[in-house]
Amino acid sequence: MRANQDLRDMETPTERTVDVLVIGAGMAGLAAAGALQEAGRTVVVVDKGRGVGGRLATRRVGGATFDHGAQFVTARSARFAEVLEKARVAGAAREWCRGFSGQRDGHLRWCGCGGMTALARHMALGLEVVSEKQVRALRQSGGAWQVAMEDGAHWLAGAVVLTAPVPQALELLARGEVGLLPEMERRLAAVEYECCLAVLAVLDGPSGWPMPGAFAVEGGPVAWMADNQVKGISAEPAITLHATPEFSSAHWDQDRSLSGQRLLDAVRPRLGAGVKNFQVHGWRFSKPMEAGLEACAVVRRDPCLILAGDAFAGSRVEGAALSGWAAAEALGVAARGA
Ligand SMILES: Cc1cc2nc3c(=O)[nH]c(=O)nc-3n(C[C@H](O)[C@H](O)[C@H](O)COP(=O)(O)OP(=O)(O)OC[C@H]3O[C@@H](n4cnc5c(N)ncnc54)[C@H](O)[C@@H]3O)c2cc1C
């Protein structure tokens, strides 16, 4: 019923026509858009959120600043290392540490200057990003993609790179009755994500945690805790806790403030100060479980529709970038072959 309604809604006039539409301004979408624009394509990025970054997320609460999604990035590939180096030179990223919980393992962890979203904002420089624009459905319309937005607008795109988490991406395709090859459908439908409850707590004094101010926690229900002031992004003492996937899924539908309180109680002896206030953020699609997919999924070649994101090339920020670049390359191949 809903799919039919979506298709009928698509009969309204087109508001905007774009060469390539990238859906999602997280790392995958920004990497894809940057590479495509560099190759001479005209690209527009849309995101339902208020800013760029997706799970590279920073939130301000008064004088406190929290990284509540990705905590750091690492570079295993030369291409991503180059991105980070450019971001460092531009003042958007810096080296944070080489290990946590007092263990220096030698691997360099980078963070955004002033918060992780700084890295996304750096990647977005020079790109046209339209925020607070949520895509509701995609439908093939001759040699293009008709894109229905939640606000009722309709866009027409010559090609689409879709970087929403896979279950959400499949929903957009289903609403526009975009069929997938059975094997691709089976593999994509099997992609699962952990969820994560994140607590953002303002303290009434310094935590006293040593540099770099972050710990992986054993035994649950907290998996990770970080002091954003020691990290160097918050003026006020502000800690981020990430619950384990087990605790997060068991408490997903329960009262968030009670769950937040339980998580804070679990680490209270280590806090070093009292909690002034806290809020809880739920990441429904936190990290994809390894699914053994290609670096991106080419759903159609003409008109081109590609799925990308961290489910494809590694469940971390670098994996999202690699997938975005793979999508841009696949699009180039498709465009040249057309
Ligand atoms: C709590 C947590 C901790 C993490 N820690 C780390 C870490 O320390 N290091 C690390 O490397 N990785 C970490 N990760 C993983 C990392 O954040 C992700 O792998 C990476 O950011 C994913 O990027 P992406 O572009 O694939 O997806 P996203 O960042 O999720 O971007 C997808 C974008 O699509 C947008 N979107 C979705 N649907 C629509 C729609 N219908 N219309 C318009 N826009 C839409 C969303 O708003 C979003 O901005 C962590 C993740 C979480 C949640």
Image: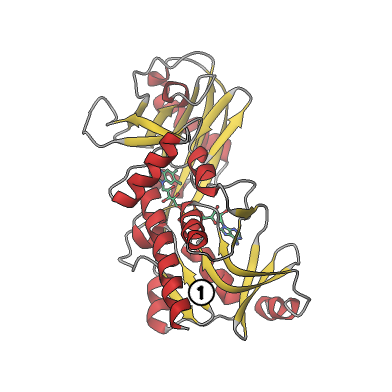
Point 69% across, 81% down: residue: 4
Left or right position of 103 against 2: left
Q: Nearer the viewer, residue 11 or 118?
A: 118
Tell how many labels.
1
Most extreme residue toward the front is 40
Q: Position of residue 311 (x, y in %)?
A: 39, 60
Q: Position of residue 66 (x, y in %)?
A: 52, 31
Which amino acid, by three-letter code, is at mark 1? Leu
Residue 97's place in the image compared with 126, above or below, is above
Instruction: Mark yes or no: residue 192 visible.
Output: no
**Dot 1: element:** strand
Q: Is mark 1 within 8 Å of ligand 1?
A: no
Quarter of the figure with residue 145: bottom right
Q: Position of residue 162 (x, y in %)?
A: 52, 65
10 Å crowding of disc 1: few (<14), some (14-19), many (20+): many
What colour scheme does the image use? secondary structure
Instruction: Mark yes or no: residue 126 visible.
Output: yes
Label 1 sits on residue: 305
Is the N terminus in the top left, top right, bottom left or bottom right quadrant?
A: bottom right
Q: Position of residue 250 (x, y in %)?
A: 45, 48
Q: Nearer the viewer, residue 262 or 217?
A: 217
Left or right position of 54 against 78: right
Most extreme residue toward the bottom is 142
Residue 240's place in the image compared with 124, above or below, is above
Point 51% across, 43% down: residue: 122
Left or right position of 151 against 79: right
